[in-house]
């Protein structure tokens, strides 16, 4: 811009300079013309007076190197000419200045010499004797004038050009400087800017405002997007059509067990598994795809969806979901279903077998009560199995049809031991209850079930004349309920597994004792339902101790988050 302003200013000053020179020249030319005419008139006056006093001798003495003087008779005959011999000159009667002088007393005419580029001005004066005195002077033409003035003009031109160069460049800089100084981010702060720029600056202010708002909106959206994706436990990746990563969240990187990817790196730098390659290939060819990916001991589901623009696939979104727990649940569920079917089938087969024998009259009448007793026992097994399954599924789904209330564990344990008195007596087991009253918030039936299962196991897996001690205690940490027996104990390697569904250390003994294999599993879930944890310690052939511990907080809220 500075250059353009400079060029324009320089050009303008150059044109103005040339025009003014031309004008000046023409003014000068006219002025010199007028000057010459008045000089000729004056000189003619003087010479006329000289002539009238001294006659033609005056003309001879006159220094007429500058002017051409011609004396002409009334008939046009040349009497004297300062340039040429009078005799050689033709009659001048036809000269317009001569004729005008005869007619008006004075006359003038101008004649141009094209070859010399000169103008000759003639002034003729009618003398008293009727003759005419003519005096001529030459004036150089414009071109000649110009040529005469060339060195001076060139000098002036050069000086003027130099001055206009400097001035134009300074002017250009001074014009542009305030524009350059405008802070385009805050044009409203500029008071020195040209008034002419006000509409432009107002537009810039508006545009800045719009851009700021749009940027703010974009930033907010970006933050929302980042907040959402970063708080997702699922991995999230956006890929372009060449499978390059455009955006990703940190969960994606940690789930794939990769190091942070650079944006625009290929997704296969994170993982090269076939599942991922298949999913990406399918999505980029326009088809949504699901694949499962196993990495170490983790299972992931890959959900790949194409991103289309105008029916053309321009990229894809990849979600990585950790389904390890879901898979484990599925495995446990199918295992549980298989176990349940098996556990139900055994007593049902027995019942059906016994009933068939009776129906076919293959049993002696005196043996019928024994067989009926077996059917009854198996049916009881079925009933307790089914009620244990129902209890477990209620705990699983946390769908307990009862309110939590404050329950005294000591009183509850007392009640359970009273119910088990006969069973204990059968094996001559001494049952003791120690400790003090301790209140926890919970569902009485479930807590009773829990204590019952622990005590029942303590009696069933005890030896003859053994003992069972239930202790309820409370300290600053929380409340503890321990059930200790002097029974067969559990091998250390199997101690962790006894809480699994249908797990039995000694299957035949459990069945013989009428166990379902679900007792400790119910204990574990019941404890968790109340915010407590259960723990087992055991020594083979010496006995086992099961402890249920309620941390202080869980005793008041019963394991519910508040
Ligand atoms: P069950 O109905 O078979 O008793 P549980 O879930 O109550 O099922 O117990 C799982 C297994 O743990 C039992 O089969 C048994 O082998 C072992 N067990 C549980 N309690 C005791 C205990 N007090 N002493 C020794 N073994 C026990």
Image: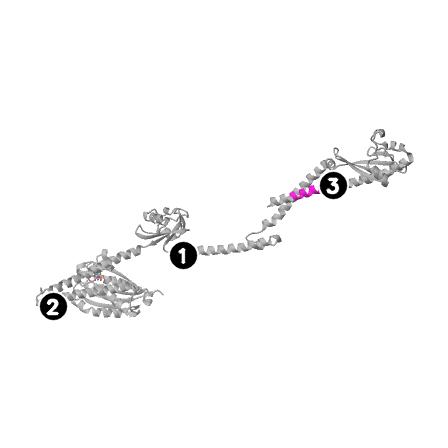
Name the side, left or right, on which 2 lies relative to 228: right
The secondary structure that most of the magenta stretch takes on is helix
What is the distance, in whole Å, between disc 3 and disc 2 at their CAs? 154 Å
Q: Quadrant of residue 538?
A: bottom left
In this view, the residue in front, 183 or 45, is 45
Badge 1 element? helix
**Label whose residue precedes the other's in the sequence (3 or 2):** 3
Name the side, left or right, on which 17 lies relative to 382: right
Name the side, left or right, on which 102 lies relative to 238: right
Badge 2 element? helix
Dot 2 alpha-carbon crowd within 10 angstroms: few under 14, some 14 to 19, many 20 or more: few
In this view, the residue in front, 290 or 78, is 78
What is the distance, in whole Å, between disc 1 and disc 3 at their CAs? 85 Å
In this view, the residue in front, 306 or 378, is 306
* Residues drawn in magenta: 10-30
Whereabouts is ligand 1, in terms of quadrant? bottom left
Query: Residue 328: where, in percent of width, then height?
Result: 28, 56
Q: Residue at x 82, y 38 (%)?
A: 97
Image depth: mark 3 or mark 2 in front:
3
Disc ID at residue 228: 1
Specify the color scheme.
Answer: one colour
**Residue highlighted by disc 2:** 369
Do tag 2 and tag 1 residues touch (Cβ < 8 Å)?
A: no
Is residue 208 a member of the stretch shown in magenta?
no
**Label whose residue precedes the other's in the sequence (1 or 3):** 3
**Residue highlighted by disc 3:** 26
Query: Residue 28: where, in percent of width, then height?
Result: 76, 41
Image depth: mark 1 or mark 3 in front:
3
Dot 3 alpha-carbon crowd within 10 angstroms: few under 14, some 14 to 19, many 20 or more: some
Is residue 16 a member of the stretch shown in magenta?
yes
């Amino acid at each position: 811009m500075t250059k353009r302003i400079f060029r324009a200013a320089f050009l303008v000053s150059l044109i103005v300079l040339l025009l003014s020179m031309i004008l000046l020249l023409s003014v000068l030319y006219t002025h010199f013309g007028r000057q010459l005419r008045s000089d000729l008139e004056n000189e003619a006056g003087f010479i006329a007076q000289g002539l009238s006093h001294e006659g033609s001798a005056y003309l001879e003495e006159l220094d007429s190197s500058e002017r051409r003087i011609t004396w002409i008779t009334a008939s046009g005959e040349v009497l004297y000419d300062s340039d040429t011999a009078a005799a050689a000159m033709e009659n001048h009667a036809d000269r317009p200045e001569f004729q005008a002088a005869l007619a008006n007393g004075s006359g003038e005419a101008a004649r141009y010499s094209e070859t010399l580029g000169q103008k000759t001005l003639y002034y003729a004066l009618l003398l008293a004797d009727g003759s005419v005195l003519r005096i001529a002077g030459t004036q150089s033409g414009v071109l000649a004038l110009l040529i005469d003035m060339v060195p001076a003009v060139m000098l002036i031109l050069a000086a003027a050009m130099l001055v206009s160069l400097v001035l134009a460049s300074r002017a250009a800089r001074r014009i542009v400087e305030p524009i350059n100084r405008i802070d385009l981010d805050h044009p409203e702060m500029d008071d020195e800017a040209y008034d002419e720029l006000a509409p432009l600056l107002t537009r810039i202010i508006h545009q800045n405002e719009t851009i700021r708002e749009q940027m703010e909106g974009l930033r907010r959206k970006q933050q929302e997007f980042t907040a959402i994706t970063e708080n997702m436990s699922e991995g999230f990746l956006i890929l372009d059509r060449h499978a390059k990563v455009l955006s990703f969240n940190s969960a994606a990187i940690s789930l794939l067990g990769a190091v942070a990817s650079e944006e625009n790196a290929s997704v296969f730098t994170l993982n090269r598994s076939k599942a991922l390659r298949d999913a990406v290939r399918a999505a980029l060819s326009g088809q949504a795809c699901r694949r499962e990916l196993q990495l170490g001991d983790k299972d992931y589901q890959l959900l790949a969806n194409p991103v289309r623009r105008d029916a053309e696939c321009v990229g894809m979104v990849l979600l990585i979901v950790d389904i390890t727990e879901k898979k484990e649940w599925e495995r446990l569920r199918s295992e549980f279903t298989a176990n349940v079917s098996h556990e139900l089938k055994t007593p049902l087969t027995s019942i059906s077998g016994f009933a068939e024998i009776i129906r076919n009259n293959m049993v002696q009448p005196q043996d019928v009560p024994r067989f009926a007793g077996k059917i009854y026992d198996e049916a009881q097994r079925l009933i307790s199995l089914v009620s244990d399954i129902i209890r477990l599924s209620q705990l699983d789904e946390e769908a307990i049809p009862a309110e939590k209330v404050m329950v005294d564990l000591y009183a509850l344990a007392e009640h359970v031991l009273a119910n088990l008195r006969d069973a204990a007596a059968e094996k001559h087991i001494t049952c003791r209850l120690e400790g003090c009253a301790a209140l926890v918030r919970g569902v009485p039936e479930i807590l009773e079930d829990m204590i019952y299962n622990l005590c029942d196991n303590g009696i069933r897996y005890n030896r003859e004349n053994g003992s069972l001690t239930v202790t309820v205690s409370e300290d600053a940490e929380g409340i503890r309920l321990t059930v200790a027996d002097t029974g067969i104990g559990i091998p250390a390697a199997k101690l962790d597994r006894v809480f699994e569904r249908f797990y039995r250390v000694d299957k035949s003994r459990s069945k013989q004792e009428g166990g379902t294999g679900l007792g400790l599993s119910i204990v574990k879930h019941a404890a968790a339902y109340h915010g407590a944890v259960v723990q087992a310690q055991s020594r083979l052939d010496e006995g086992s101790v099961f402890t249920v511990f309620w941390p202080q907080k869980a005793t008041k809220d019963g394991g519910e988050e508040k």
